[in-house]
Image (spheres, helix red, strand yellow):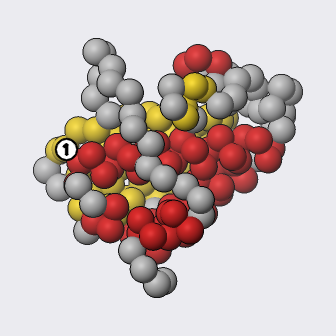
Amino acid sequence: MAGSALDRLRALGLELPTLADSPYYVDHREVGSSIHIAGQLPYKDGVLLGQGIVGRDVGLETARELARHAALNCLAAAVQAVGDLDRVRIVQMLVFVASTPDFGLQSRVANAASELLIEVLGENGRHARTAIGVAGLPANTPVEIQMICTAA
C-alpha cells in the first residue's frame, strides 16, 4: 500500500472529522497498551446522517454507508489517542445494527466498516469483529461502532 494512511483516506475522498465533546463520557480511554474507543454514531459535522431500523426504514446500502462513517469517527477518536493515523492498529470492532428481527445481514453492514479500515490502515486495519442486531440505538441511529485499538 503506497503512501500514508492519511493519503489513502484522502484518496477515498474522506477526512478525519472533529468529534464533539460530551460532558458524560470520553471518546477514548487508554488501559495499558489498549485504547478503548467509545461507541461512535454516524455523525458528520454535528448532524446524524440517518435514523431508523435497518430492514424496515433503512436499506442495506444506506446502513453500510452509515457504518463506514461511524468507523471513520472511531478512527478520529483513535488518532486523538495515538496522535497519528499511521500508528493506529485496530484490535477489535463491535458493530451494533438496529434492525428488524428477520434482517440477518448485520455482518454485511459491518463489512463496510471493516473494508474502510483495511483500505486506510492496511494490515493494521484487520481486526477481530462482532456484528449484533439490536432493537434500538441512541438517537434512533441505525448503526453504532465501538473499537479497541493499540498504537502500532
- Whether residue 75 is visible to the viewer of this picture, yes or no, is yes
The relative height of residue 8 versus residue 38 in the rendered view (above or below) is below
The relative height of residue 92 versus residue 143 in the rendered view (above or below) is below
Asked whether 144 or 13 is in front, the reply is 13
Q: Quadrant of the C terminus?
A: bottom left
Asked whether 3 or 22 is in front, the reply is 3
| Left or right, 100 with reference to 24 | right
| Left or right, 74 with reference to 152 | right
Q: Of helix, strand and loop, which one carries label 1?
A: strand
| Left or right, 88 with reference to 123 | left
Asked whether 105 or 25 is in front, the reply is 25
Image coords of residue 60 (percent x, y):
80, 44
Image coords of residue 129 (percent x, y):
51, 54
Residue drawn at point x = 32 percent, y = 49 percent? 78
Quadrant in which residue 121 is drawn:
bottom left
Image coords of residue 9 (percent x, y):
50, 63
- Whether residue 101 is visible to the viewer of this picture, yes or no, is no
- Dot 1, how many residues are within 10 Å of its Cα: few (below 14), some (14-19), or many (20+)? some
Residue drawn at point x = 65 percent, y = 55 percent? 112
Q: Residue furthest left?
A: 32
Amino acid type, label 1: Glu
Image coords of residue 56 (percent x, y):
86, 27
Residue occupied by mark 1: 30
The relative height of residue 127 versus residue 60 in the rendered view (above or below) is below
| Left or right, 36 with reference to 111 | left
Residue drawn at point x = 77 percent, y = 41 percent? 62
